[in-house]
Image: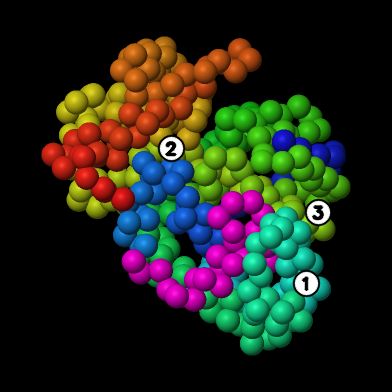
Amino acid sequence: MLRIHFTGDDLPRTRLAEGPDAMWEGLLSLYRLRRPHGAAVFGPWRRRVGPKVPESTRMLTDLVPSTGYAVDFLTPTTTSGTLRDGVEALRGTRSTRLRGDLAELAARHPGRPLPGWFAGLAEGRTETLGRVADAMTDYAKTCLTPDWDRISTEVRHDLALRNKAHAEGGWPEVLGGLHPSARWSYPVLELNYPADHDVVLDGRGLVLQPSVFCWGAPVTLLDPELPPVLTFPVAHETRWSAAAGGQASTGRSRAIIALLGRTRTHVLETIALGACNTTQLARRTAIPVPTASHQTKVLREAGLIASERESNQVRHTLTPLGAALLNGSLLRPEAGGDHR
């Protein structure tokens, strides 16, 4: 469980990000690159960029294991969120920060072999840190830049929704709707998290950063001394998944629409982009709650989604059959082959 503790000074100092943050997208995309979760959204991107990943990315994956803790210094705070400013801030990381994060990485992943170049980084050697910064630049330019317009559109669309929520209901409306697991009861925001972790804002406020490559639970920095930021999954619609797949994805979407109908397809794709309850689903798809409830009933009876009661609400998730339909393996004649 993640608990973020506010004071009376923190809400006025809390703010939504201005746009996407290239360093957070870079770090989180490294998880998506190596893990199967979110195949309906990231599968086409993984298949497209996988063969092009620069060899230097190995330095980044040494710092970002496929699960669990990754070093805080790869996501420095910048005003602009651009790759250039993020990499420049990375190059200026203090040696104490490097040593502390590397020690934390070793402690949280016991038994994981440490590459020899970590010694130079822990000593704060400029050339070693420069190689890490260059690796992030090369990785982002190869794997993220071609899709950056779509990433930016998704993040800005999410921010527009959050700003609208703030205008209508203030910070309680925003914080309570950040994620399906969000529970806001002043002065504490609780969210699902892989481990127990408390963030005490102590008057510093909080930056709320939507991210395309954040999947599942929101993430934050481990070190409580760093500027507080909460990175959370964007309220996906269908643009990223459709655009990332190119023509094949567009044709597949048309086939699914012909099979299920446009509204039901939109509901299914929205659930695939993140578990949600019926009210959240209605908000994300811009349909009335009774319509959302009816559509989930039909999809559940077809075995495409599963619905589980949590407290007084029902949470909807995609089933393997639903994922197979969205990925196209049920729509292609060669469905029995390996389509990885």
Q: Amino acid at mark 1?
A: Arg
Q: Position of residue 128 (x, y in %)?
A: 64, 83
Callout 2 touching callout 1 (CB < 8 Å): no
Q: Is residue 255 visible?
A: yes
Above or below for 72 versus 88 = above
| Residue for point 64% across, 80% down | 117
Q: Is residue 52 left or right of residue 258?
A: right
**Residue 228 in magenta?**
no
Mark 2: few, some, or many residues within 10 Å (few <14, many ≥20)?
many
In the image shown, does 181 or 12 lie closer to the viewer? 181
Element on which disc 1 rests: helix
Q: Which residue is mark 1?
A: 99
Element on which disc 3 rests: loop
Of mark 2 and mark 1, the one earlier in the sequence is: 1
| Residue bounds of the magenta highlight | 51-75
Q: Amino acid at mark 3?
A: Pro
**Residue 55 in magenta?**
yes
Q: Amino acid at mark 2?
A: Leu
Front label number (3 vs 1): 1
Q: Which residue is mark 2?
A: 273
Q: Position of residue 15 (x, y in %)?
A: 67, 48
Report, in whole angstroms, how far the alpha carbon at label 3 lies from the one at label 1: 16 Å
State which quadrant residue 185 falls in. top right
Q: Which residue is mark 3?
A: 224
| Residue for point 16% across, 42% down | 334
In the image shown, does 199 or 178 lie closer to the viewer? 199
| Residue for point 67% across, 54% down | 69
Element on which disc 2 rests: loop
Q: Position of residue 141 (x, y in %)?
A: 43, 71
Of mark 3 and mark 2, the one earlier in the sequence is: 3
The quadrant of the image that shows the N terminus is top right
